[in-house]
Image (tube, rainbow, N blue to C red):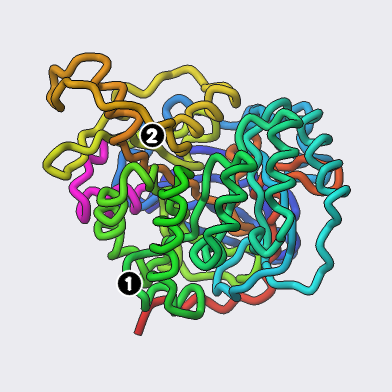
Amino acid sequence: MKKKIRTTRSLCPVCLKNLPAQMTEREDGQIFLEKTCPDHGDFSVPVWRGRVDFRQWVQHAGPLAEGEGLSCPGHCGICGSHQAGTCCVLLEVTRRCNLRCRFCFANGGTAEADPSMEELKEAVQDLVRQCGQPLLQLSGGEPTLWDDLPELIHFAKESGCSYVQLNTNGIRLAEDPSYVRSLAEAGLDIVFLQFDGTKDPIYEYLRGKPLLKCKTQAIEVCSDLRIGVTLVPTVVPGVNDQDLGSLVRFAEERVPGVRGIHFQPVSYFGRYTGMPGDDGRYTLDQLMDDLNRQAGIPVESFMPSRCDHPLCGFHANFLLTPEGGLKPLTSITRSARERGSAKDNREYVARHWKRPEAEPEPAGSFSDEMDFDTFLYRLRHGSLTLSAMAFQDAMNLNVERLMRCSLHVYDRGTVRPFCASYLTPVRNSSALTSGIS
């Protein structure tokens, strides 16, 4: 037995045709996105496992109105029907890469020629004109293969980008501290570090080589230069979903150098073009439940996104206690009904991911009754943010979510939602076999 609980629109994963879709609830509480293409048949994919109350989680996000989303995603960029401004905008500076990862949304490592510095500066000026003062994410490929990156960072800050973030695998950061210093001097605010777990077999499976020592060294280099680091694991069932508690403890031990963990449940686009089985899916509520079981984090600490759609992600803020635990500062029961603006969300991201300036510690002690100055100091220097972004692929794309996306990609004059920009059709129907043997 199954029950329809919401109507929306999606895509055929084969031909990418816009289709009517519905979300249905099974007897075990799992929720599936279902759709039918007249040319390619029926498709069903799990989007919620029933471990967190779905209705409470999405209660402030209304479904698509009749007639909405009929032409999404299209190729026109951010259109007048889009419901969110730009919080962050991603700019690829190279397609080259020094890894060949099993999962890569950008399918990095191609021989495509790099854009010139002049082209990238023009792109920065254009995206500032289109998006205001965004948080700029410099990405790739592997952007640190580009020697002139410090010049581009400085130019971006001078041109009006509020903050600059570097999306990187960290290899060059570990091996070339002088290069990292030049990034810091140019104004780099945040390092978004690919960091999948605390054991080398995880990296050998996902990234092709043992990288834990290298990535730990990258954190140390950035910490010495006061560049805030956010760890970014791609969470794959059977590979690293049982390492989440260890990952949280790893981050706790490196606060304030490590500012947060940004979990990304695996999605199947870019390099991976097959159609995974249901057991290859890892949903937001699975992630929250696993963090609860492995790290003791209360599920009610997590809040759904207010800038994007609630099914796109979550965030939770914690103070690090003197005993080494995490004291929650957020709760779903206190989640605001109002949508947050792109600017508000951008400032929130920067406040929690950017390393604060050094300042003397106040005399107050850590306690539930700590004075306001002590609380602010602990918030700036002794806090950890856990967040997540569940990217969509051609199987589970929900137009309702796409229309509220605030993470955009700049490409040759066009700004598009992230999941629309990297969308790839399914090219074979073989199910994913994951896991570390």
Amino acid type indicated by mark 1:
Lys
- Residue at image position (35%, 67%) is 240
Picture disc at residue 57: 2
Q: Tag 1's secondary structure?
A: loop
In which quadrant of the rendered view does residue 139 lie? Answer: bottom right
Q: Measuring 39% from the left and 44% from the top, which residue is drawn there? A: 260
Residue placed farthest to the bottom in the image? 437
Q: CA distance from mark 1 to mark 2?
A: 33 Å
The spot of residue 188 in percent (x, y) is 59, 42
In the image, taking residue 324 as reference, residue 161 lies left or right, namely: right
In this rendering, the answer to whether 340 lies above or below 229 is above
Q: Is residue 70 magenta?
A: no
- Residue in front for this viewpoint, 2 or 71: 71
Which stretch did the figure color magenta?
Answer: 285-300
Whole-percent x, y for residue 340 in the image: 52, 22
Q: Is residue 96 above or below residue 404?
A: below
Q: Is residue 13 visible?
A: no
The residue wearing badge 1 is 199
Whichever of callouts 1 and 2 sits on the residue coming sooner in the sequence is 2
What crowding class fits label 2: few (fewer than 14 Cα within 10 Å), some (14-19), or many (20 or more)? some
The quarter in which the C terminus is drawn is bottom left
Residue kind at label 2, given as amino acid type: Trp
Q: Is residue 34 left or right of residue 213?
A: right
Front disc: 1 or 2: 1
Q: Residue at x 61, y 71 (%)?
A: 272
Question: Relative to the observer, which residue lies in front, 343 or 423?
Answer: 343
Q: Please identify the dominant SS of the magenta region.
A: helix
